[in-house]
Image (cartoon, grey):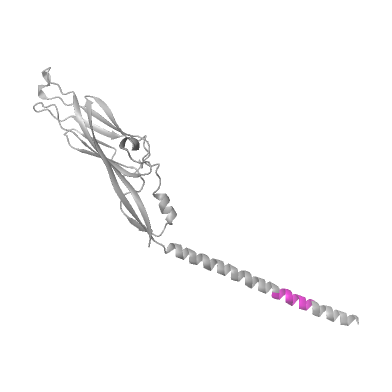
Amino acid sequence: MKDDFSILNFLMEDYSRRILSCFLSLLMITLSFHAISFFYVVDIENGKSSSISYSVSFISNESSGQDSILVADESSENLILSREIVSIDEQTKIGYIEFLVSYSESSGEFLDPCDDVHVEISTSGMIADWSNPNNILSESSSDCDEMILILYVYPNYSGENYSTNESSMEEIQNTWSDISFGSGELTVTIDVNTNPPPTSAIPSIQDDDEEIIVDWTFHLFDFQVDEF
């Protein structure tokens, strides 16, 4: 009788092991299925996002003006510009600012040579892309040539439309929506050293100042992002 119980216990234990083995196998199959399904969906989503391309187009505008500044010999004068002074809305993005500086010998004296003029943009005050290699922050002239200065304000802005599939819509919008650039005051300093005419020995004839004309242009922009 004891042997009969041993055989029965053995059979029951074997049956239990088979049930447990089947259960574990089924569990592993289920987990594997879910894992494969998850990574398959992720791959599809990644493929989907990488296949989406966006076109970024810029809508440009300008705000320009002119200032006439009389600078005395061996002295300097400052031209100060800002959003508030130029009446540019704080939500409007500033791409870059251009300056055309011109002058002519205005003494009216015979053979009076052109004066020495130096123009420089101060690298403080306005938040801008000061490290941009295309910036022209200072120029000099001693022969009445026009001088061109340029300050790139918004980083990476060139005004050229482009397409990309490496960024999301949100990333693109964040890239071109930073209105902090262009805030603050921009100072342009003008130095003059006059060159006297041959008749300067006559007390009544003196060249002691110069009129400098500064034409400035703020290149403004907005942007639009389209999916294709």
| Residue 86 position within the rendered picture, expressed as x and y whole percent measured from the top left | 31, 37
Looking at the image, is 193 positioned above or below residue 19? Answer: above
Residue 10 percent across, percent down from the top left: 81, 78
In the shown orientation, is residue 92 left or right of residue 73?
Answer: right
- Looking at the image, residue 195 lies above or below residue 154: above
For residue 95, side relative to residue 139 (left or right): right
Q: Which of 147 and 63 lies nearest the eye of the viewer? A: 63
Q: Position of residue 165 (x, y in %)?
A: 40, 60
Q: Assign the N terminus to one quadrant of the image.
A: bottom right
Q: For residue 4, what is the image quadrant?
A: bottom right
Looking at the rendered image, the quarter that the C terminus falls into is bottom left
Residue 126 in picture, x, y percent from top left: 36, 37
Residue located 63% across and 71% down the image = 30
- Seen in the picture, residue 139 relative to 76 is either above or below; the reply is below
Q: Is residue 155 magenta?
A: no
In the displayed structure, 214 sits above or below 178; it is: above
Seen from the viewer's position, the closer of residues 88 and 200 is 88
